[in-house]
Image: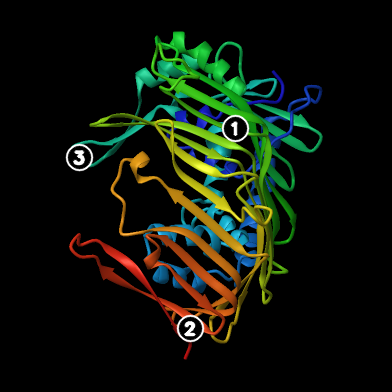
Amino acid sequence: MCGTWVGVAGRTMKRPSTILAVSILTGLGLAACGDEPPPPDEVRARISTDLAGVLREANAAYEGGTQGAPGGAASATVDRLLGGDSAAALQLRTAVARLAPAARVAAFAAPAEGDFDPDATIAYLNEKLFTDANYLGDGIYQVPPALVCTETTIDSTGTVVQTIDAACAEKLAKAELRVRVAKSGDELRFAIQLDADHDEPLTIGLSHNAVSLTVDLDDAWHAAVALAPLFGEELPNASLAGQITGRLEVLGAAHARATLDIDRAVAIAFAEQGAALDGPDAYRFSSAKAKVFAIELDGAAQHASFALGLGATAAHVLDDTDAGRDRIDLDLPGLTAAAEFTEGRPLEVTRVSLGDRTASISKNGRRAVAIDLNPDDGRAFGATLGLDPATGRETLAVSPKLDLRVVVDHAALGDAAPVYDVTQILLDGSVRSDATGDRLEVLTGSLEISTNPAAYGITAAAGQCVSARDVEDLPSGDIYTQWLVSACQ
């Protein structure tokens, strides 16, 4: 087969977790079969130059592109006002304080310092895998037991001893795990092959300025079907379908873009033997074809942009408790946002939306949580988040407004109702964080927090400040957040 692959290699190999760290941000293209496969010395040279260059420039783009992004002070203030880990804090953090997606998603996507070593990855690939000794010809590399099945122990004298696990080596031979390298124009394609049909559910592409990864779930399932009897295992009661592509591309010095797309709608289901995959006792996840996100970071210009575009997504999960089995369903119509940030300028966020209808969580067929965002204003909003470098104070302005509504049915959830639930957060105007991070000042318009029971909510107008304190409810002993509205000093 030309141009697909499996993600099984990262799970099978004990040491090459680094290759997954490389491929996690990446995307694909299907390899042409007509080009002559590159010889091992060319493969190693391209890994040493192209892969190293992409990783280092991407890291420089991240360091410069996210420098000075606003969001920290506002987030800290919201946490204090809404009680840190309270439901209210979670709701407002999600809707307001996390309005710096370019910086925050980039921080999520980039490997943490010390977690990933490009030089070690390159050395590992060139010295352990893509060697002359492992080359079988026609672009195919064997994966030797020493690479996958080595066990390291320390004997009674303190000497490090490395041995090959015989059972692991036997399974490796049955799996027929190999790596195929093909060439298409200036791009190399690395495919992990499995089983006698050489299925390739995962493909990594490498060009002079990009690294890419595609996972084909259909091929992954085909490989599982082929391998199960070879290992004496019963085929799981499951189904996999869809394709996901990621890509990391260097656009210039310290300038990179990362994307993740669902090329074909993803549908995953699994259950115990005998249970219907479309029935109540199966785990299911699905997400529509979509351009899930794109992040562009320009370290030289200290600029970042971000676009999120998750399509309709659903999940059905099972939760076994002492009282029995609960069936929980997530219905997320969509999740979109776009942002632009340049050092020294406000962060602009547009098209923040949860889709075209109510998002919900149901338990045992009964809706337990319903979430609406701007239901009367096109189900979307935009925001500007600015930072005053002299004072560290941040200003948030929304348009047309931020109207987050949450309905919780505690009977459906099977839990006890708290002192109150936040049912609506309505910001129509702009707010500014206090220099101490303890208060929010309403600059224009109003800020309203509605609760059930209603007595715990507040409304603050322009010129007023909102602060919060923890209060013990008597006689229950529960701690809740009490908001206070006062004139700003």
Picture residue at 48% right of the left edge, 52% below the top: 406
Specify few, some or many for label 3: CA neighbours under 10 Å numbering under 14, 14-19, or 20 or more: few
Which one is in front, 363 or 247? 363
Picture residue at 44% right of the left edge, 84% below the top: 486
Picture residue at 26% right of the left edge, 40% below the top: 159
Q: Say which amino acid is labelled 2.
A: Ala
Q: Quadrant of residue 64?
A: bottom right
Q: Earlier in the sequence, mark 2 or mark 1?
A: 1
Image spot of residue 436 (x, y percent): 44, 82
**Could one spot residue 117 in this view of the protein?**
yes
Q: Earlier in the sequence, mark 1 or mark 3?
A: 1
Secondary structure category for the residue under label 2: loop
Q: Quadrant of the N terminus?
A: top right
With 51 as the anchor, is 77 left or right in this view? left
Picture residue at 37% right of the left edge, 60% below the top: 453
Secondary structure category for the residue under label 3: loop
Question: What separation in Å lies between label 3 and label 2 (alpha carbons)?
Answer: 60 Å
Which one is in front, 51 or 9? 9
Question: What separation in Å lies between label 1 and label 3 (alpha carbons)?
Answer: 35 Å
Q: Quadrant of residue 146?
A: top left
Q: Which residue is mark 2?
A: 435
Q: Which residue is mark 3?
A: 157
Whether the residues at callouts 3 and 2 have beta carbons within 8 Å, the answer is no
Q: Say which amino acid is labelled 1.
A: Phe
Q: Which residue is mark 1?
A: 130
Q: Say which amino acid is labelled 3.
A: Thr
Image spot of residue 185 (x, y percent): 81, 34
Whether the residues at callouts 2 and 1 have beta carbons within 8 Å, the answer is no
